[in-house]
Image (cartoon, grey):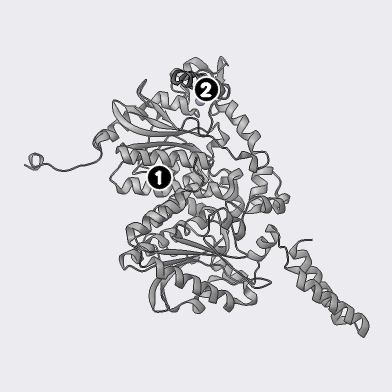
Amino acid sequence: METLFKKRQERLNIFKKMRNQEIISPKKEIPDHLFTSCPHCHANLVTAQLAKNLYVCPQCGHHFRLSARQRINQIIDEGTFKESDKYAQTENAHEFVGYQEKLKLSYQKSGLLEGVVTGYGKINKQNVCIAVMDASFMMGSMGHVVGDKITRLIETAEKKHFPLIIFCTSGGARMQEGIISLMQMAKTSQALKRFKEAQNLYISVLCDPTTGGVSASFAMLGDIMIAEPKALIGFAGKRVIEKTINEKLPEDFQTAEFLMEHGFLDMIVKRDEMKSVLAKLIKIHGGAHGSTAKITNDQRA
Amino acid sequence: MDLQQRLQMISELEQQAKITTDNQALGLLNAKIKIMKQQAFENLSAWDRVFLARHPNRSKFHDYLPLLFNDFIELHGDRCFGDDASMITGLAYFHDLPITIIAQAKGNDLSSNLKYNFGMNNPWGYRKAIRIAKQAEKFRRPIITFVDTPGAYPGKTAEENGQAMAIADCLATFSNLKVPVICVVLSEGGSGGALALSIADRIVMLENAIYSILSPEGFASILWKDESRYKEAAEAMKLTAYDLKELGIIDHIIKEPKGGVQQDLQSVVNMLDHYISQELNQLIKTRPTVLLNARYEKFRRIGTI
Ligand SMILES: [Zn+2]
């Protein structure tokens, strides 16, 4: 009887795996095209070399947008990443006309079931909880699955007392989910507040683009605020602002450099230095044991 | 025909009645007007409520202030950059209880609307709200917030001063305030700018107020690339008080008189007064840790996987 049940369970698991693989085809590290054109300097780059260069243009330093998987491969020690809520996906998309089709397109385009990958792993052997958003999934917009996955990660990080890193890249709220999407701003922000009040470290890394409801919630609440060079970061859209104030905005408006100049970032970090900067920051905060920066008697003496 | 068109028709008939000399025709006209007036406010669509929520004559925070509270003392400034006129903060008595008020203000004509920036706050407005909220916590005063904004101001100076961060800080700060917070949505609750004052233990909404992720016009333009579909957007967005009550986003609805709150503000104030009294009485007896956990759960359960 028991073996029969076990067998059934195994078959069910295989079926589950197959079903999931059907939707989540592993995205290739290197795109099909041999050459990639840099959107900034228009240089024709060999894609394989571009990948080796962490998707930074060797000519002009333009940081290409990364998929969540690419980012995790660059940041997390090999073989240490454990993904959480991997199969979480929107169940009620039929409630809004056209949403289901949009999601299906995004599954194919991104190889993901939602706009954020969450989990834990190690950075230079130090434990971290990490969330990485993916702009190729509906512009990384925050629906309830994104909001809840991030909230659950924050709560896990608090329980484990791990440092938390979120790589943000998002156009903002997910319009199709309306008010529920808006409320994810409240949910993630309050979870972060609790996490931070408990002496935990939160590093927010703003990537291109970070705007709207995501910028006005968890993205801007880092103990340490980092951005990638030239990333677009802001609340309102540039066109909306231009229309409101009836004025042309400068070229560098809402760039990482602009935010740095106005005092909203701790640092702008190039991609090839990102991992080592994060590792140093985690280390000085006491690593994964938490930030119990007590001065011992020895140190005082 | 939507509400605006129905009202337009009534006023046209009224004009006609003024110049009608024939007694019989006038009688008929008046009877028609009477019936139309009776029916005008029945079966309101979501868009009709948007129309009422944005109506220029709709009561604003300043109309409620003397009716709900005594001895208001206004406090100004964010201690950092400036004083946002569209974020009114201060102290007052609610019955005998000292409380803190944080309110979004709109004007009722062009000059006052320019002063209040049409209810759109700047970062120094949200930072003023944070400062005053922390002060309330220090002196153990409950906070009552009033939401009435089309959204945060999309301006150049606003971005230069960290509009996104100011709102995010508001959300985080209010989630952790160890005093009761009651949020009253008066008319328009637009996006993150409204959410900034909505992290509360109770959210109460006027019957014809709206609360949404974006304006219906903006929603139609972004999602369907067609701003003219705003009425359709309003229906799809679930932005009325009844929709939001059903979704569990808000706690209570205050009924409005026919034609909107401005027709009988006192009756709405009475109901609001009763609701706030009743809820505050309960909330001020609640231990801070219990209060904070309940507030956390209130938002935690929205859209779980
Ligand atoms: Zn280039």
- Using the numbered discs, state the Cα–Cα distance from disc 2 to disc 1 in whole angstroms: 56 Å
Q: Amino acid at mark 1?
A: Glu
Q: Residue extending furthest front?
A: A1
Residue A151 visible, this orientation: yes
- Which numbered dot is residue A106? none
Mark nearer the viewer, 2 or 1: 2
Q: Which residue is mark 2?
A: A12
Q: Chain of mark 1?
A: A
The residue lying toward the viewer, choosing from B47 and B224, is B47
Q: Which residue is mark 1?
A: A261
The residue lying toward the viewer, choosing from A236 and A8, is A8
From the viewer's perspective, tell me whether residue B56 is left or right of residue B103. Answer: right
Q: Is residue B210 above or below residue B263?
A: above
Measured as percent of width and height from the top left, residue A93 is found at: 61, 39
Q: Is residue A13 above or below residue A237?
A: above
Q: Looking at the image, how many numbered discs can be counted on the residues?
A: 2
The residue lying at 45 percent from left, 48 percent from top is: B300
Q: Chain of mark 2?
A: A
Q: Is residue B213 above or below residue A130?
A: below
Q: Earlier in the sequence, mark 2 or mark 1?
A: 2
Residue A255 visible, this orientation: no
Do labels 2 and 1 touch, CB within 8 Å?
no
Tell me if the residue at label 1 has its CB under 8 Å from ligand 1: no
The residue lying toward the viewer, choosing from A49 and A288, is A288
Q: Amino acid at mark 2?
A: Leu
The residue lying at 29 percent from left, 39 percent from top is: A161
The residue lying toward the viewer, choosing from A90 and B188, is A90
Measured as percent of width and height from the top left, residue B72 is found at: 43, 77
